[in-house]
Image (cartoon, rainbow, N blue to C red):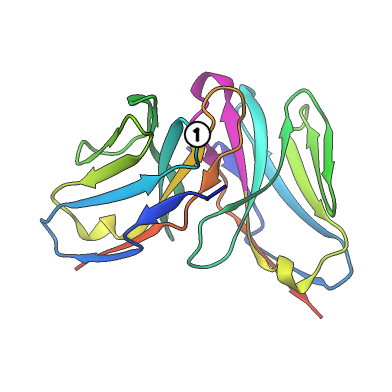
Amino acid sequence: KAGVTQTPRYLIKTRGQQVTLSCSPISGHRSVSWYQQTPGQGLQFLFEYFSETQRNKGNFPGRFSGRQFSNSRSEMNVSTLELGDSALYLCASFQGTHSYEQYFGPGTRLTVT
Amino acid sequence: DQQVKQNSPSLSVQEGRISILNCDYTNSMFDYFLWYKKYPAEGPTFLISISSIKDKNEDGRFTVFLNKSAKHLSLHIVPSQPGDSAVYFCAAIRGSTLGRLYFGRGTQLTVWP
């Protein structure tokens, strides 16, 4: 089975711009979660999508949004980028209802200048 | 508020010896606990998990112990190998928010020959 894939792997953006990151889950997984990793805050939960609906949401501002498509692929969008948004963005997929283990993609390294 | 804590940022162990990584949590509503290993520039890799109704789970060289009364879990790696050198994250899940992992800050394990 192919693992979780994320595109792009690296991204450099300027303050004020917006960015869209993509995640393709493991086949058969219906849930996708997004996390932000920074040296100062560690791994922070952004949101989770299950069957195209946002099921859980972390404590991030509304500039961070996401969506999930019918094939379970997910995108997250960050608008009006700030320097503090520079981070590794990780997505994880899991079956969604009967198991707890989440499997992570390699991440997208976003640098905001 | 950090609900999952890993108080040792680093641990250094000789090859062949036991590595013990510790994790504490504050929320008694957690139902499931997981350990992940992370190399730089990669996503976390799932290692082993344990349900809150168990006190031990073993998988090869990895064993996780859970002490619910103390709200403490530990990961034992025996024997430790240089390839085990990585950052280890403890994570927890509440059954009511399946898609959300609560992470500790991680422990950098270094296994030296």
- Element on which disc 1 rests: loop
Q: Is residue A69 visible?
A: yes
Please identify the residue farthest to the bottom as the structure is shown: B113
Q: Which residues are magenta?
A: B90-102
Please identify the residue farthest to the left as the structure is shown: A16
> Does residue B94 show up magenta in the picture?
yes
Residue type at tag 1: His
Residue B57, image x and y in percent? 82, 38
Q: Is residue B100 above or below residue A10?
A: above
Q: Is residue A68 above or below residue A85?
A: above
Residue B60, image x and y in percent? 85, 51
State the residue at coordinates (16%, 47%): A79
B21 left or right of B27?
A: right
Crowding near the residue tagged with mark 1, few <14, some 14–19, many ≥20 C-alpha atoms within 10 Å? many
B23 left or right of B104?
A: right
**Label 1: chain?**
A
B33 left or right of A111?
A: right
Instruction: Write down the residue under mark 1.
Output: A29
State the residue at coordinates (64%, 52%): B7
> Does residue A27 show up magenta in the picture?
no
Location of the C terminus of chain B by quadrant is: bottom right
